[in-house]
Image: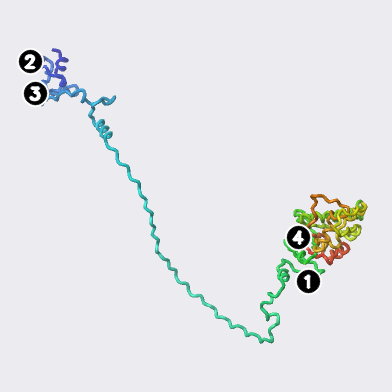
């Protein structure tokens, strides 16, 4: 028998055939190494004989129980991987975890107290003995009543609060700062006089140019009427009267800007004609044109510089054009009513030493109060 068939007959998986086993005499004569008997196994291409009387080889493993191949396990596999999968799949689900209850955190307040070193006592100076009081006959009469200010009038207490020194005589010029301008206007209105502000820097005019103010440029009126003769005194007076009505209706300042001129308001007022005081309306025939113009150009002088007289009912009725004779009133015409905030003031660039002398022919000095801006930068 060939050697390959003898090795195949000795395969432990296939059942050995006793008919194929050679006789011992034939194996001894042959040059080939004798084959191991039944019970031998192949190891690394060599045959090892455990002995004829050794243990019986294990039975063949069924195909269904063999180790699965790398391509995957078959049905009925009992390997460790498949056993773990089956045990994981059949494991019952864990019950849901109850919600966690949060308990409020209680903080313990520290009871540590810090004790500071006591400060040394401060020495108290000894009280000086009070000077002896003078006898009652020596005490001045002004210091006898400690509540003398209580008996002062409200006007005296209000005047003591102004930010500038009050005039001691009617002819005194009050020196003020630029920041005290509005207080100066209020003070002049409180005593019933027209404020005349002397300022060479021109900042007062710029200040009123940016406020609710109606301006009358007096120097062009003087040049046109008395030097150039391009305008009449009635036209100049009517220009002033129209500005007075406009400032009254809206409650604005009426600024008479004189600069370095001294307009003669007396001559301008003399060229006008005072209208009748009664409210006659169109009951009388209209007057001639020149008389009508003179009445429209009328403004009160020197009442223009007296706040109480200018805003009085008699003066307002004369200034109202609706009260002139021959005027036809309309349904939407409103009477002239002076609003709150209306005030007349004069600005000039004269020096304080020459102002009263130059402006005496133009203004009623007894109804005016002069202020001088000492420092225009403050």
Q: Residue furthest top?
A: 1
Does residue 182 appear to the left or right of 58 in the view shown? Answer: right
Please identify the quadrant where the C terminus is shown.
Answer: bottom right
Residue at which label 2 appears: 23
Q: Residue 299: x percent and y percent?
A: 86, 58
Residue at which label 4 appears: 376
The mark nearer the N terminus, 1 or 2, is 2
The mark nearer the N terminus, 2 or 3, is 2
Residue 67, by quadrant, is: top left
Give the CA distance from mark 1 to mark 2.
167 Å
Does residue 100 appear to the left or right of 373 in the view shown? Answer: left
Of badges 1 and 4, nearer the viewer stands 1
Q: Residue at x 37, y 53 (%)?
A: 103
The mark nearer the N terminus, 4 or 3, is 3
Residue at which label 3 appears: 52
Give the CA distance from mark 4 to mark 3.
140 Å
Of badges 4 and 3, nearer the viewer stands 4
Of badges 2 and 4, nearer the viewer stands 4
Of badges 1 and 2, nearer the viewer stands 1
């Amino acid at each position: 028998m060939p050697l390959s068939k003898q090795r195949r007959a000795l395969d432990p998986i296939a059942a050995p055939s006793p008919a194929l086993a050679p006789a011992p005499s034939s194996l001894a004569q042959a040059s080939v190494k004798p084959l191991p008997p039944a019970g031998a196994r192949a190891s690394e291409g060599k045959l090892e004989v455990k002995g004829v009387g050794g243990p019986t080889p294990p039975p063949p493993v069924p195909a269904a129980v063999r180790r699965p191949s790398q391509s995957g396990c078959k049905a009925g596999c009992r390997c460790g991987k498949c056993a773990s999968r089956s045990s994981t799949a059949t494991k019952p689900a864990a019950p849901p975890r109850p919600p966690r209850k949060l308990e409020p955190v209680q903080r313990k307040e520290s009871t540590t107290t810090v004790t500071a070193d006591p400060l040394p006592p401060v020495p108290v100076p000894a009280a000086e003995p009070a000077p002896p009081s003078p006898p009652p006959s020596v005490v001045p009469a002004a210091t006898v009543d400690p509540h003398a200010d209580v008996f002062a009038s409200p006007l005296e207490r209000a005047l003591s609060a102004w930010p500038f020194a009050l005039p001691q005589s009617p002819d005194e010029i009050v020196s003020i700062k630029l920041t005290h301008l509005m207080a100066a206007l209020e003070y002049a209105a409180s005593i019933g006089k027209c404020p005349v502000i002397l300022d060479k820097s021109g900042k007062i005019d710029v200040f009123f140019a940016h406020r609710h103010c109606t301006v009358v440029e007096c120097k062009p009126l003087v040049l046109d009427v008395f030097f150039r003769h391009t305008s009449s005194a009635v036209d100049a007076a009517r220009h002033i009267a129209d500005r007075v009505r406009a400032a009254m209706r809206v409650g604005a300042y009426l600024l008479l800007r004189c600069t370095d001129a001294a307009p003669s308001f007396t001559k301008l007022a003399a060229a006008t004609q005072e209208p009748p005081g009664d409210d006659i309306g169109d009951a009388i025939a209209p007057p001639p044109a020149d008389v009508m113009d003179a009445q429209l150009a009328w403004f009160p002088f020197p009442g223009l510089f007296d706040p109480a007289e200018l805003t009085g009912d008699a003066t307002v009725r004369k200034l109202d054009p609706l009260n002139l004779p021959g005027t036809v009133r309309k349904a939407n015409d409103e009477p002239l009513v002076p609003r709150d905030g209306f005030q007349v003031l004069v600005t000039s660039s004269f020096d304080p030493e020459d102002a009263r002398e130059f402006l005496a022919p133009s203004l009623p000095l007894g109804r005016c109060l002069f202020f001088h801006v000492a420092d225009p930068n403050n």
